[in-house]
Image (tube, coloured by chain):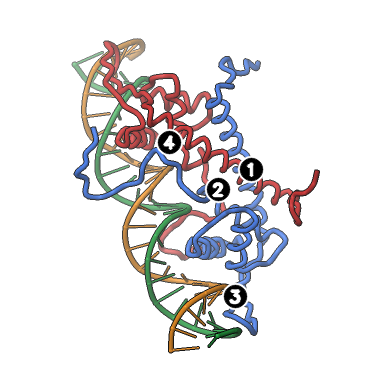
Chain colours: A red, B blue, C green, D orange
DNA sequence: ATCACCTATCTGATTATTACAGATAGGCGC
DNA sequence: GCGCCTATCTGTAATAATCAGATAGGTGAT
């Protein structure tokens, strides 16, 4: 098994990351803002409750600031009477374009996943997929 | 507002990563070794040619060493007459188990992707499933 | 009024994974 | 010799996530 005498711990290479698939939180943030103006906390809750995408607050807020920094979303403060103020985000035109880009990229991700499962389950057509 | 006077460049937050989907190179390496003993260079070529999974050599070799470090694959030197020696890898029992784990995780990834596309194309069932 | 808790945002430090670049080396053909 | 393909590996930077905590407004209970 493993070598217990290591000085520095490291992640087990064979275990998939727990929780949300990585690398497309940006896409999720963009798609959440498609048609709605939401603030960070709301996005976080929606992602968790409706889509089981759990993310730590720091990650979400940081990602939103990055998207704003690059012009894909813009924000303003919503000074409600009750509770702390919220920063409300809206998609820009550039953000809408970016979302399309992400969608295309994620379609490729999905094809890639399908290829993995074909290989894993042994359904891979070794000579080519001329099966019809 | 954007600050144009930044000293260090950074990645554009709205653009999906080019190339291979991230975070499951390990799964690809494990599945490639399911049933075959291959060396790193061969895995790299197969991934690129058959599955369009392009990875830089350093990343692949490093990932293989990590998998070996944690006991999911094991290797030996194949001293062929022609060309440089190759390190040939084979799946261990633990590696087979890890592959199953990865498969389960990637199924969840795929469901997550489907949810994204449902939301993106507006096919989301707003009222959920009121099971009970 | 203090405390616990929920909302709401943000930052610092660390880890994980990939990207980019280059080193090393064997063998082949010119 | 030189260039090219095979084959492996290391150093360093960038990216994205995790873990931990700070800050602050508001509500309800003790």
Please tell me whether residue A118 is drawn above or below residue A3 in the rendered image.
Answer: above
Observer-nearest residue: B75 or A10? B75
Residue A2: assigned label = none
Q: Which residue is mark 2?
A: A16
Taking the spot 33% from the left edge, 22% from the top edge, the residue there is: A88
Please tell me whether residue C3 is drawn above or below residue B73 in the rendered image.
Answer: above
Q: Nearer the viewer, mark 1 or mark 4?
A: 4
**At numbered mark 1, what does the secondary structure look like: helix, strand or loop?**
helix
Whichever of labels 2 and 4 marks the residue nearer the N terminus, that label is 2
Where's residue A112, x and y in %? 61, 46
Where's residue B125, x and y in %? 59, 18
Q: Which residue is mark 4?
A: A26
Taking the spot 55% from the left edge, 22% from the top edge, the residue there is: B122
How far is mark 4 from mark 3, CA to CA? 40 Å
Q: Contact, CB < 8 Å: mark 2 with mark 4?
A: no
Please tell me whether residue B18 is drawn above or below residue B14 in the rendered image.
Answer: below
- Going by the image, does B92 lie left or right of A80? right
For disc 1, the neighbor class at 10 Å (few under 14, some 14 to 19, many from 20) is: few
Q: Contact, CB < 8 Å: mark 1 with mark 2?
A: yes
For disc 2, the neighbor class at 10 Å (few under 14, some 14 to 19, many from 20) is: many
Please state the total of marks drawn on the protein image: 4
Label 2 resides on the chain identified as A
Q: Are marks 1 and 4 on the same chain?
A: no
Q: Quadrant of the C terminus of chain A?
A: top right
Residue B86: assigned label = 3
């Amino acid at each position: 098994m493993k070598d217990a005498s290591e000085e520095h711990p490291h992640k087990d290479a064979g275990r998939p990351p727990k929780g949300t698939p990585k690398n497309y939180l940006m896409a999720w943030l963009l798609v959440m803002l498609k048609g709605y103006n939401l603030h960070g906390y709301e996005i976080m809750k929606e992602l968790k409750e409706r889509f089981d995408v759990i993310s730590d607050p720091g990650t979400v807020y940081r990602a939103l600031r990055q998207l704003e920094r690059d012009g894909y979303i813009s924000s303003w403060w919503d000074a409600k009477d009750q509770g702390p103020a919220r920063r409300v985000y809206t998609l820009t035109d550039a953000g809408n374009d970016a979302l399309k880009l992400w969608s295309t990229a994620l379609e490729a991700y999905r094809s890639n996943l399908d290829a993995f499962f074909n290989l894993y389950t042994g359904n891979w057509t070794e000579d080519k997929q001329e099966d019809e």
